[in-house]
Image: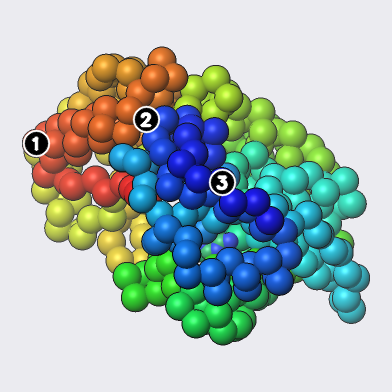
Amino acid sequence: MTIKRNIDIARLTTFGIHAKAAAVVTYSSLEELEQIIADKSLPTPIVHIGEGSNLLFTDDFPGTLLINEGDSVEFIGLDDNEILVTADAGIPMDLLCGFAAEFDFWGIENLSGIPGSVGAAVVQNVGAYGVEFKDVFVEADAIEVATGKHRKFTLDEMNYGYRYSLLKSQEWKGRYFIYRVKFRLSEVPNPKLDYGNLRSSVGESPTLAEIRKAIIAMRDSKLPNPSEYGSAGSFFKNPVVSHSEFERIVAENPELEIPSYPAPDGIKIPAAFLIDKCGLKGHQLGNASVWHKQPLVIVNHTGNATGSEILALERLIVATVEKRFGITLHPEVEHI
Ligand SMILES: Cc1cc2nc3c(=O)[nH]c(=O)nc-3n(C[C@H](O)[C@H](O)[C@H](O)COP(=O)(O)OP(=O)(O)OC[C@H]3O[C@@H](n4cnc5c(N)ncnc54)[C@H](O)[C@@H]3O)c2cc1C
């Protein structure tokens, strides 16, 4: 376990924004986590983070950031060609995707290249190319911050939705720290190729490794590499509007062919399209900018952006899209 005080956290988030945390604590075993929770001298609040790839610190943080540095991963063969994977929460999701590709275990290949830890994948329900983490999730072992009590979260309880889970809800957020995750893979090939131009780039019966390689290449071609340009990936959620709202937008914008997808509670419109049509692609505000290849991403353009500059650009985008289309965008990135 390590406890460090008054730490610059630029390297703890993919935005790379300089801010200070009162304490940063790392742990690698359950015993250490129990000790940390029992230690009432640590600055509060205590927030468990992974790779900080979905976080925007808008100011210095007066509490403790907690990071799991466990390195245990176990693959167990079950009946019916299934594999049960058990991983410490801090293990990078993409490392697990890489192992799975090497062993030919199917299920998470479409999540290749998504930054972040497997513990956060449970909370965030990460998704890409038609697959979400909920599709393989079995259960997570967690500890309640207030009481130190242990509990498991199973698939049935997690109330998963688009980038949403029970642990993101107002009531449950921050109450439990996940320290171990179980999910299920399969030895039976099951390529999911319907999303975007995946099928055309890999053909009808690709190997798992071919899918992983193609997805990483596609992601690299449109998303900024956090080691060059700090970002937190898609900054906004895609808005879902009612059918009548969608008709209004179409009627008011006859010159546009507005892309849309059916969603359980209405019609989903790509936020990137709306931002692009407002002329904001590539727009720079101070040290922050809208990524020139994918307007859903805000980047720390010069490496010197502050949390307030990113916030100012976020507000400009929200106000401009609202004025032009009457739609309010909401951030996917969590503000701390
Ligand atoms: C370039 C780029 C591309 C991206 N592409 C995608 C994509 O395609 N699809 C997608 O879904 N996301 C994408 N993201 C967003 C991000 O990768 C995911 O949200 C990821 O799950 C965040 O993982 P993390 O470990 O960095 O979590 P953090 O950002 O550190 O934390 C995210 C949330 O999870 C909580 N949390 C983290 N660990 C734990 C734990 N052990 N116990 C309890 N709570 C915890 C945190 O408190 C916080 O609320 C992208 C980000 C970047 C930078």
Q: CA distance from mark 2 to mark 3?
A: 30 Å
The foreground one among 149 and 294 is 149
Which one is closest to the eye, mark 2 or mark 1?
2
Q: Describe residue 276's horizontal placement relative to residue 322 as left or right.
A: right
Which one is closest to the eye, mark 2 or mark 3?
3
Identify the residue position indicated by label 3 in the image. Answer: 4
Mark 1 or 3, nearer chain start: 3
Residue 165 image point, x, y percent: 46, 68
Q: Amino acid at mark 2?
A: Ile
Q: Residue at 81% across / 59% down in the picture? A: 73
Say if 225 sits above or below 74 in the image: above
Residue 1 image point, x, y percent: 68, 56
Q: Please rate how many residues cluster around mark 2, counting C-alpha atoms within 10 Å: few if below 14, some from 14 to 19, many from 20.
A: many
User: Is the residue indicated by label 3 positioned so its CB lies within 8 Å of ligand 1?
Assistant: no
Mark 2 or 3, nearer chain start: 3
Q: Residue at 40% across / 74% down in the picture? A: 172
Q: Please rate how many residues cluster around mark 3, counting C-alpha atoms within 10 Å: few if below 14, some from 14 to 19, many from 20.
A: few
Identify the residue position indicated by label 1 in the image. Answer: 323
Q: CA distance from mark 1 to mark 3?
A: 45 Å
Q: CA distance from mark 2 to mark 1?
A: 20 Å
**Residue 55 in view in this figure:** no
Q: Please rate how many residues cluster around mark 1, counting C-alpha atoms within 10 Å: few if below 14, some from 14 to 19, many from 20.
A: few
Which one is closest to the eye, mark 1 or mark 3?
3
Identify the residue position indicated by label 2 in the image. Answer: 298
Dot 1: element: helix
Q: Amino acid at mark 1?
A: Lys
Q: Amino acid at mark 3?
A: Lys
Q: Residue at 40% across / 24% down in the picture? A: 300
Dot 2: element: strand
Residue 271 image point, x, y percent: 31, 40
